[in-house]
Amino acid sequence: MSDDFNPKILGFLCNWCCYAAADAAGVSRFQYPPNLRTIRVMCTGRVDPAFIVRGFIEGADGIFTGG
Amino acid sequence: MLTNADLLALDGKPGDFTAKIRQRPRYIDADNCTACGLCTQYCPKHLVDPYNEGLALTRPIHIDYAQAVPATYYIDPSSCLHLTHDTCQICVPVCQSHAINFSQQPEEISLKIGAVILSPGFGRISKETLAKFSYGKHPDIVTAVEFERMTTASGPFLGEVKCFSDGRHPKSIAFIQCVGSRDLGCNNGYCSSVCCMYAIKEALVAKEHDPEVDITVYYMDIRTQGKEFDKAQLRAEAMGIKFVRAKVADVTPWENRLQLTYSTLDGRHEFVPHDMVVLSVGLEAPKDAHGIAKITGIELNQYDFAKSDTFDPLTTNVDGVVVAGAFQGPKDIPESVTQASAAAGLVAGMLEKQRGQGIVHTEYPEEKAMGEEVRIGVFVCHCGINIASVVDVHKVEDSVEDMEGVVYHTDSLYSCSADAVETLKERIIEHNLNRVVIAACSPRTHEPLFQETLKSAGLNRCLIEMVNIRDQCSWVHAGEPDAATNKSEDLVRMAVAKARGMQPLPEQTVPVTPKAVIVGAGIAGMTVALTLADQGFDSVLLEKGKTLGGNLGLLNHTLDASETAAKLKQLVAKVKKNKKIDVITSAELVDFSGFVGNFSSVVASGKKEHTIDHGVVVLATGGHEHRPGGYLLDENKKVLTQMELEKRLAGRAKNRAPDSIVMIQCAGSRGDDLKYCSKVCCNHAVKNALQIKELNPDSQVIVLYRDMRTYGYAEDAYREARLKGVIFIPYEIENRPEVYEKGRKLHVKFFDELMQEEMDITPDLVALSVGIVPDGTEDLSKLLKAPLTDDKFFLEAHVKLRPVELPVSGVYVCGLAHGPKPVDETIAQAQAAAAKAAIPLVKGAVSVDPIVSTVDQDKCIGCSLCVSLCPFGAIEMIKVGKRRKAQTISASCKACGICSSHCPTFAISMGGFTNEQITDQIIAFGGVKEKETADVA
């Protein structure tokens, strides 16, 4: 394994837009780095700031919210 | 849904048609195709991709685009090697779900139908017309459709704009408007209505990709007459996009650039080089319009679009055949969607007697008890080789072995295949599973299928969690099998963590009171009431005035010369006679409560008060003429509005058509008192100008305008007015015409852009095109908790896709309350609102999605923060004992979770997305760190 920074990113994806877009990226076979782990929510309005804090506590290097 | 199909013949009568249809083979069984795309990868033959305007290559076996419906591949018979040369067939063994079927033959189908909706869309401007702008002579002259594909992020160039000639990024781009529109040279006298707006959009997108690019739009009139459209042009100007009012005469290739020759209003000729030229092509009638007309018997207009009239915009001359979309006339997405709803509603009215026939109801076993123990089954899908060629499926499956709560795990080749679904059901029963995790593709496409399976196995449908290891993993990390496997394991672990907390959620249905309240009895409200009555539903029509008819009663005729008075009289009589319509005049909505299906309204009328229980409400509150200051309106009696002028012209006074008149467009609009364009005023001015010329051919009629927005077929009337001698002179916003009195004379001072000099004239009359303001929307907005735009019109739930629904469930809008629009568009929109409002009424019950918020009233402190934050008005405050507590109105909840994430006491929980579940997912995500650290060690 290289010494390059290999961040762990936690993502909150809105079911209606960002999650759908991530699906479309797949259908089009767009390639992107495999660092993201996602949690689907019905709207980014669901994302409590506490989730973001918790994500960092659990070791996320970055948090992505897509909505 | 029959795709790849042609209508061959239509016989019979309304309610009893027989349609003969030919279905061409797609050579792929739609039931088996999983849309994995493997066949395209292996197909050896190239095909120029028509979907991408020939800018990319695809294969004979392909799907046009990711969102295509049905999501099934098809084979182009004109290029497939097997179908043309009887060779190849590589795709057959490649397809693991055995979906390829070369034995398919064209089929003729005979369908018994009650009504027909024609929506074939629009056709293309001919190559000959494009050739006038040197299209085809130089590769850097492209149509706007080609440019659209080029700028699309998912298109062949991933959004990169480049010159075809040498691949360089263009430094300057010219858009030429009205190519194939407003052009008698190609027999397209009409305006295509959408090109100005799409040109602005494409220019903005190009500018976003490359902020340095210089963009000029060459136009005759910028016709951004739609709701909120002017704002787009202002934004474009703010981003540095230039708009030049000019007629482009010629485009000449000049070294590696393109030289535009154009003339401006003041008679100057200019020659300007650009790197790329985009032709804003108009919309034509569909290519097979004559064929459709022949088969169905409908009449076409002079431009080969379906013929209809102002008061029945979607009705053709053939009973039982209606039209919607661009075939009715060029139009944009919101209007096409509106017409589609309206057409569906009209047809539902025609087929009211047959409603409910042919519906198959599925029976499900009773849900079994959950029990204390968590028993999770994990199913990992190979999706043929779609997942398995990248992700180590067995490793992922093995990784769940020791996870808490997992009692069963397996893999399958295609989880969604009929036999796999049956196996899933058997395993659920056999292992007494009470929660299911399926690692496969997207829940957006496949969750409904697996939910059905759960229901048939006696489980609540909310007890499934899908993990997307295909679309969001194997497909996007194709070259990194280890990382993709790792990611799949993490996602599965997170899903299992969430699944432990899954609980069955109740399936609720709420009964609907089968009655509508319609606020406003103008042409919009009356149309809604009559359309609903046709479908068999009662409504209460509220009118604040004493009579029905609204603004239509103030008009004399429409631009296509239909008399309005007789039509209005007919309509009012129909409404009054209809037993399903209850009219209350002098009515005011004073109180409103409840939710979709169960509203309660209190209406005051004189001294009486009525309480009405109803299931839906349609807002058709209308608007009125704005009265701007600064033009001596209401100060000098020679200054009139267009409405007042119309009334005067319809009168009997001898000198009712003045010898000279100046009309001032946008008086008080588009940046004056009102920010927006009112859409109807240009048509109104042209209509009155023609009427004056009819009565007094020698009259001098001068129209001072900013952009003449006689879109669609109204362009014909504009041309007629010019031919009859009406003088149209443009002015700039910073140089508005001035109306003043001197002595007893009324003066109009303006700068003549054609003569390039200041003019001061003394007309007999001045007519102001004043714009429209909505009536009473602010009060209603508060009462119904329905949002407004900045301009005080109701804001629709989705501007393009849900144009007549408001964000609050069960509330619909049409007519001027939605935005300024002419009579025909108002009627179509009212029919659409009625069609949408009829949906809950037809169903008789509103089914509530199980994912809704619930308030724990022990924890709730009654702060009502959630009530103020909920965008859908789905939370109310109720009294529990002496305290105020929040309560979700489940039928209105859209599951966004804003309430839940903001509640200061964590009293609100989202079904299927509880705080605990999401936290468990995050904790499971945390496992990544430990494992990878271990890997490194």
Image (tube, rainbow, N blue to C red):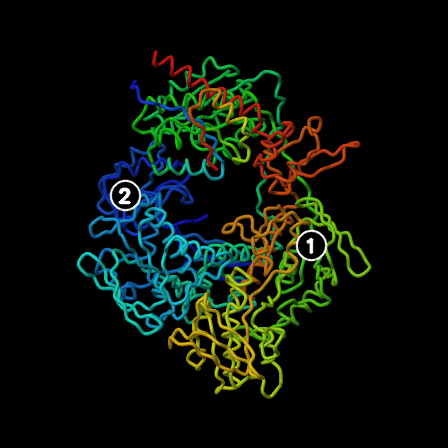
Amino acid at circle 1: Val
Amino acid at circle 2: Arg
- Viewer-side residue, B495 vs B173: B173
- Name of the residue lying farthest toward the right: B607
Q: Horizontal and vertical percent for residue B225?
A: 48, 62
Compared across the picture, whether B458 is left or right of B32 comes to right
In this figure, which residue is indicated by the disc labeled 2? B59
Looking at the image, is B167 positioned above or below residue B461?
Answer: below
**Disc number at residue B517?**
1
Compared across the picture, whether B827 is left or right of B599 comes to left
Q: Nearer the viewer, mark 2 or mark 1?
A: 1
Q: Horizontal and vertical percent for residue B219?
A: 37, 65
Q: Residue at x 53, y 72 (%)?
A: B684
Q: Residues within 10 Å of mark 2 (few under 14, many from 20)?
A: many
- Viewer-side residue, B24 vs B53: B53
What separation in Å lies between label 2 and label 1 (alpha carbons)?
54 Å
Number of numbered discs present? 2
